[in-house]
Structures are given as structure tokens and as C-alpha cells.
Image (cartoon, rainbow, N blue to C red):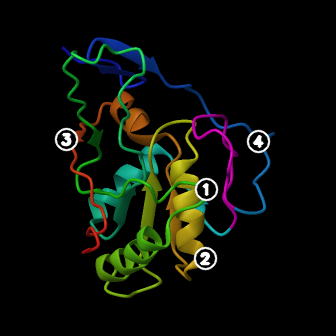
Amino acid sequence: MRVPASVLVRAGFAFAFLTGAASAEVPEPHDYWMGPMHSEVPATLSGARIVDTKSLAVILDQGKALLIDAAEVPHRPENLPQNAIWKPVHQHIEGSVWIPGIGAGKIEARLETYYRERLKALTANDQNHLIVFYCHPQCWASWNAARRALSYGYRNIAWYRDGAEGWQDAGYALVAAKPEAPPQPCH
């Protein structure tokens, strides 16, 4: 049974994401978004192109883009009893690299260094390599992560604002994801 992607079901609790297109009325912030991560997003991202599902499918068929999933790691619901088993499964578009945390308004220096180095490695240090960012509909994480990559000098950035749920709702499959994270410092 397929659960509509606009509803995430975790341990018996359903969390609905806001669906629908981004509003042209939401202005781009001058810097990274520091407000609520799951809220209305702008229709644009200066310096990047916006791609829809059909365009993303074409890009993926060409096999030359790097997909970055900027979604956060799911957090245990506050109202879930402590003795309840909770095993969330994050799903994303096949071939994506999931790096949680890179879409926060402010990130730790260690994560920022890791993110810069990962982008260099994943693009073979080619700042013209096409990188497509996404997370969830009406989520700022991918917007911030893409903006951050632009600030690093990457010039071929695309933002898929419909996110994993939009991809699945269009009939495409998602796969289970494993997060990447910077190595823990030695003490």
C-alpha cells in the first residue's frame, strides 16, 4: 500500500507537510532563512534555477547532476511515549546524497567544512557541475543549502522545491536513505 507522500507516517503518527506551490509573495531573505524551517518558501532563489518534476526527470535521465537531499534527520515526536519503538525511515530520490544539517540558517564550522569538502569531492572540484537541491515541500533546508553552495562559488545550481514528496506524488519511487555526517572529532 502506497502512502501519499504529502503525509509522512512515523510510528503511528502522521505529520502533514504543507503542499502546493511556493508563493511569489514570499520574498527571498537577504541571507539564510533563520525562521521556521517548515513554512512557505519563495518562488525563486537568486543565482539558481528552479526545476519542476518533469525537468528533474530529464536531468536525472542525463545522469550528469549531483542530487543533494538537505532534509533534516527526523526527530522523535514529543508526545510519543518513551517506551514506544520509533524507527523512522527517511526516503529520498535514488542517487541522492543526504547531508542533514546543511540547510539550517546557521551551521557549525565543522559541518560547514565537511559540506565544502563533500561538494568538492562529489563534483570533482568543478564549480560548473550541476547540483540539484531538495528536501520537502515548503521547507527552507534545501533553499539554504543551495544558497550556501552558491556562496562557495558553485555556478550551476538548481532547486527542486517540490521535494521528495513531490517526486513520489508524480509517480516516481523513493528509496531508503542513510545520512552523511562529518566524522566525530577525537578527544
Q: Which is more N-terminal, label 2 or label 3?
A: 2
Q: Which is more N-terminal, label 1 or label 3?
A: 1
Q: CA distance from mark 4 to mark 2?
A: 23 Å
Determine the image quadrant of residue 176. top left
Indicate the secondary structure of the residue bearing disc 4. Answer: loop
- Residue 27 x, y percent position in the rendering: 80, 48
Q: Which is more N-terminal, label 2 or label 4?
A: 4
Q: Which is more N-terminal, label 3 or label 4?
A: 4
Which quadrant holds the N terminus? top left
The magenta stretch spans residue 40: yes
What residue is shown with label 3?
A: 176
What residue is shown with label 1?
A: 105
Residue at screen point 38% across, 28% down: 169
Q: Magenta segment range?
A: 32-46
Residue 51 visible in rendering:
no
What kind of residue is marked 1?
A: Gly
Determine the image quadrant of residue 144. bottom right
